[in-house]
Amino acid sequence: MRWNWWMAPLAALLVLAGLVGGLVLARPRDVATVDKGGGKVHAPSAAKPGAGAKPPAQPAQPQPAQPAEPQPARPADPAPGQPAGSAPKRPAESEAQAFIRTFMQARMAGDAGKVSTMVLPEAVGKGSIRLSGPGARITGYTAQLLGSGNPDLFIFRVDVGFGNGQPGGEVSAEEITLTWKGGLKVAAFAERAKDSLGLGVGQDGKLYLHQGQATALAGDLALLPDKAKPWGAGPGIIEFGVGKEGWSIAAVNTAGTHVLWVTKGLHPLVGVSQITWGSNPVMTPLDLLFEAGAVDAAWAPGSSRHVAVAVAQPSGATTLFVYDVMSQEKIDPGLEAKVGGGPDFTVRNLRWVTSTTVAFDLQRAGKTTGPFTYDISTKELKTP
């Protein structure tokens, strides 16, 4: 073939076109392109396996279910006010003592409903818990916390004075056990007969105090003086003959150390015996009741010092006096001037609600009201 001069430039153009075409064909196919006409995005197609290509992701295969690991038990929610994860806290001794005070005040008031709410239904010996009643009235008590050796319990020794307005009376020595888990309650009750006290008149007319198998002489009319003066009488007051026709009332304190007694007769004598257990008592006259008498008496709890006496006056009133055995002082609340309505009233149901506060009811015109209280420390009389 004959080579013309114009064929050389044409050949060069053909070679250059071939190089450009090869570059276009070699462009990678996995680059997204935009279709300007439709405005759509075309995703790259998956590359075939080959050199430098990644294999397509395999779908996740379902795995066999694994047994759940055991979880620790969740602790019970703590009681209100109790830190999480802590055991129930033993109440303070003061809380147990406060419970006993409330329990004994309910017994003293004869409140059977309240007492029953404070005692477990299955409490041991609960049938022997006595309340104040017409036959025997609780006049005071003392409570002592004993060591139990068991952190779940509180054990108390309680000495309870009972009076019946007669020359007698008793002190019941009791053991009261409290449980506190789930709230303070009486879990057991027992009377300690060997420690209890009983006061009465023997066939020989003498006063005797009994404790278990022991007996002590508490009063002997033959040991009393023949004449005496009313309390506070000055030197110009003559002495009067002492009534010795028997005993109108008598009461023993909760410790069993002293007995208050009042004789019978025109001029009854009020006095106190200190018990000696083995010999004659030390009998100390306190007051001569001029043409009067006594109908009731009650000792302050835990005391051998203060004793309240309901005294029938010649005026017709039965009023209240408190005797201080230590100082031989006679404390007069002045009821006749303070309660109003004249002297026709009668003090009834003497009982001590604290060691310094005596409570009582007043009966007038067949109607009884109360309680009245008198504080021997502040000399304050409170009416209902």
Image: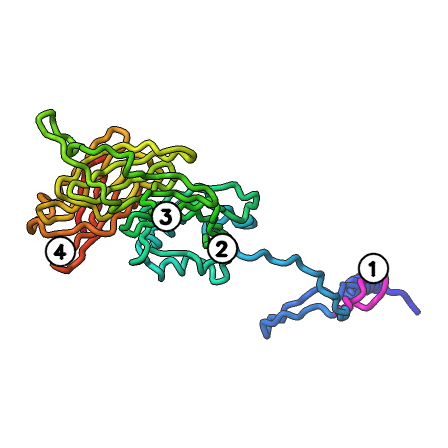
Q: Earlier in the sequence, mark 1 or mark 3?
A: 1
Assess disc 2: are there few (<14), some (14-19) or many (≥20) residues with their C-alpha within 10 Å of its C-alpha. Answer: many
Q: How is the image coloured?
A: rainbow
Q: Is residue 170 left or right of residue 241?
A: right
Separation of residues labelled 2 and 4 (CA atoms): 42 Å
Q: Amino acid at mark 1?
A: Gly
10 Å neighbourhood of mark 4: few (<14), some, or many (≥20)? some
Residue 223, percent across and down?
29, 34
Picture coordinates of residue 4 (x, y %)? 86, 65
Residue marked by disc 3: 170
Magenta segment: does it hold 181? no
Question: Observer-nearest residue: 252 or 322?
Answer: 252
As helix, strand or loop, the secondary structure at mark 1 comes to loop
Residue, disc 2: 187
* Labels 2 and 4: the sequence-earlier one: 2
Q: Hey, what amino acid is under mark 4? A: Arg
Which residue position holds label 4? 364
Residue 303 figure quarter: top left
Q: Secondary structure at mark 2?
A: strand
Q: Amino acid at mark 3?
A: Glu
Image coordinates of residue 283 in percent, x first then y, are: 30, 33
N-term mark: 3 or 2: 3
Q: Which residues are magenta?
A: 46-60
Q: Residues within 10 Å of mark 3 (few under 14, many from 20)?
A: many
Give the labeled residue for mark 1. Answer: 52
Label 3 – label 2 distance at C-alpha: 25 Å
- Majority secondary structure of magenta residues: loop
N-term mark: 2 or 1: 1
